Image (cartoon, rainbow, N blue to C red):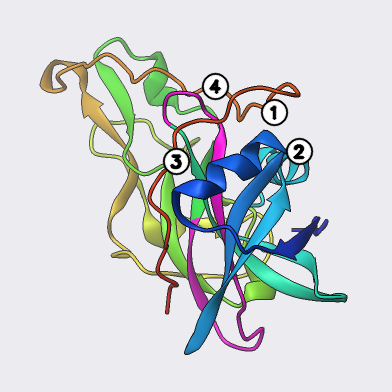
Amino acid sequence: MSERPSLTAERRTIVGKAVKRLRWTGRIPASLVESHKPTIPVHLNERELAGVVRRGHTGHLVNLTFDGAVEQVLLDDVDVDAITNRLQHAVLRRVDLTKPVHVTVPVHFEGTPPAAQASDLVVIHALNALEVSALPTEIPSYLIADVSGLSLAGDAVRVAELRAADGAFTALADPAAEVAAVHHARAVRVEAPAAALPETEIPAEGAAPAEEPPEGVAPKT
């Protein structure tokens, strides 16, 4: 990603269910994790974190100001309440910038498949995200699947054909796995799509926090 966002973290002494009190003040509990070292409880500005999440920076490096210093850490995970869509908890991971990490990157579909114009054919998107290995500084913003060549039943775009919008990656899935494929419409049982989740909300001042989720996210290795 060309623009690296910034977050500011402060040490947190409140833990467990009591952290819901932080949300009344616009702070989100978070954990700063590092392999083979104790997890550091911290808290973040809710509006600041929500803006970073909305811009798609989860799973990418951010500039973290903490204890008077600025460091590059991975915004590893963000928990959102499934009902209220309020931010609940974040995990920041200290990583070695010279060693690859495993992250999940979204897949964007590019082009218009000719098969989409045929009444007896349907184009199925089998993967919307892919786990990859990449250097922390080279994690792609997203992966591109070019579906403009999908014309006939059996045509497919496979993992090996994906390319990065930026950065560099190694796919951790089977290179032959289908990302998108053309099928005969009569062979596909059409199901209602899942309702789209609303964007992460920034609560109004004084809004009640959501119920507290379990804390203690294990760091990735």
Query: Quick check: marks 2 and 1 in contact, CB under 8 Å?
Result: yes
- In primary-sequence order, the first of circles 3 and 4 is 4
**Residue position for label 3:** 212
Q: Nearer the viewer, mark 4 or mark 1?
A: 1
Residue 95 highlighted magenta (yes or no) = yes
| Amino acid marked by disc 1 | Ile
Instruction: List x then y, in percent, for residue 16.
Output: 45, 55
Q: Marks 2 and 4, Cα distance to the nearest angstrom?
A: 17 Å
One can see residue 166 in this view: yes
Q: Which of marks 2 and 4 is in front?
A: 2
- In primary-sequence order, the first of circles 2 and 3 is 2
Q: In this view, does 180 lie to the left or right of 60?
A: left
Q: Marks 3 and 1, Cα distance to the nearest angstrom?
A: 17 Å
- In primary-sequence order, the first of circles 2 and 4 is 2
Q: Residue 202 carries which label?
A: 1
- Residue 107's place in the image compared with 109, above or below, is below
**Residue position for label 4:** 198
Number of other residues with Cα within 10 Å of mark 2, as a class: few under 14, some 14 to 19, many 20 or more: some
One can see residue 145 in this view: no
Residue 203 highlighted magenta (yes or no) = no
| Amino acid marked by disc 4 | Pro
Mark 1 secondary-structure assignment: loop
Residue found at x 44% / y 24%:
114
Number of other residues with Cα within 10 Å of mark 4, as a class: few under 14, some 14 to 19, many 20 or more: few
**Residue position for label 2:** 47
- Residue 212's place in the image compared with 218, above or below, is above
Residues in magenta, as a range: 82-104
Residue found at x 64% / y 89%:
98
Residue nearer the viewer, 77 or 158: 77
Q: Nearer the viewer, mark 3 or mark 1?
A: 3
* Quarter holding residue 24: top right
| Amino acid marked by disc 2 | Arg
